[in-house]
Amino acid sequence: MVDAKMLKTIGSAPGFIAALDQSGGSTPKALSLYGISETDYEGEEDMFRLMHAMRVRIMKAPAFTGEKVVGAILFERTMDGDVDGQPVPSYLWEKRGVVPLLKIDKGLLDEENGVQLMKPMPDLDALLIRARNKGIFGTKMRSVIAHADKAGIAAVVSQQFEVARQIIGQGLVPIVEPEVSINSPTKVEAEAMLRDAIAEQLDTLTANEAVILKLTIPTIDDFYAPLVAHEKVIRVVALSGGYSTVDACEKLSHNHGMIASFSRALTEKLRVSMSDADFNTSIGETIDQIYAASVNKVETGTENLRRLA
């Protein structure tokens, strides 16, 4: 059974979801932006040790609480780690009031038909059971759409919802993330195809099935409003997709019903060399900025609303 208090927090509490789920391939870049170069560590274990230390520093920051951060997406190693001797999932929920979530995908296949599907996950059920037993509420899985190819987008959405049903079957809530690249030359067209494909899949869900959607901030303001309103959608969250914090927040502020689920935009100002006081001030300011974009919305122009009809 899904935890009712966590569901209420994720589904309706004001705030945003922090994405602390950089995996093996993206960790070196995340550490580099933090001020730790590849010459500062030896091997994968040392790399992940430093990454975990960064994440713990974020989770322990005074501003990182359920007052503005409703959830946190974790890498598997982070889920298995601890904060001051307490397992990360229970620390987040019991000490910070933040709902713990888990990244489950194993990366992407090569591009075909303008998209990258997820790699196979043969051990998914075992991971889901272990995550549930550790207090994880839900999961996140990412595909990428580079071009407006109808067949490719249909394949991405079909795969996402197939896995989503498997996740629901294990008592967890899936975050469906078919990311449209912000650099796509056909981003607007891809978003239209994606919205239609998602709506079709949502209509096939049964009475006890529901999902969270994690989508690229659309080019047209409020373009995903029909998905926000769909009865099978718990919440729609936005990925930053490579936008700076300022740009991501500005774009998000025009999309009603969407909250942030930012990764790089959350951590871009943090540096390992900062004092604890400076670090906490910096992450606090960024949390305030992302929270404001998630909660306080700019009124959308009538032209954009007309285009949604």
Image (cartoon, grey):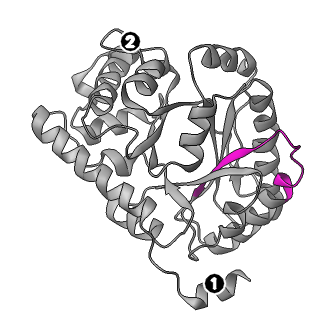
Q: Residues within 10 Å of mark 2 (few under 14, many from 20)?
A: few
* Residue in the foreground of this view, choosing between 218 and 118: 218
The residue segment tinted magenta is 200-215
In the picture, the quarter occupied by the C terminus is bottom right
**Relative to residue 152, is residue 117 depicted above or below?**
above
The residue carrying pointer 1 sits among few (fewer than 14), some (14 to 19) or many (20 or more) residues within 10 Å by Cα, namely some
Front in this rendered view, residue 59 or 27: 59
Report the residue at 67% width, 67% height from top: 191
- Residue nearer the viewer, 9 or 303: 9
Q: Residue furthest bottom?
A: 303
In the shown orientation, is residue 47 left or right of residue 208? left
Is 212 one of the magenta-colored residues? yes
Q: Tag 1: residue type?
A: Leu
Quadrant of residue 97 in the image? top left
Query: In the rendered view, would you say 105 is above or below 125?
Result: below
Against 229, residue 159 (above or below) is: above
Q: Circle 1 is placed at which residue position?
A: 305
Task: Look at 68% across and 49% down and name the residue there.
Answer: 111
- Residue 64: x %, y % from top left: 32, 38
In this picture, is 80 found above or below 160?
above
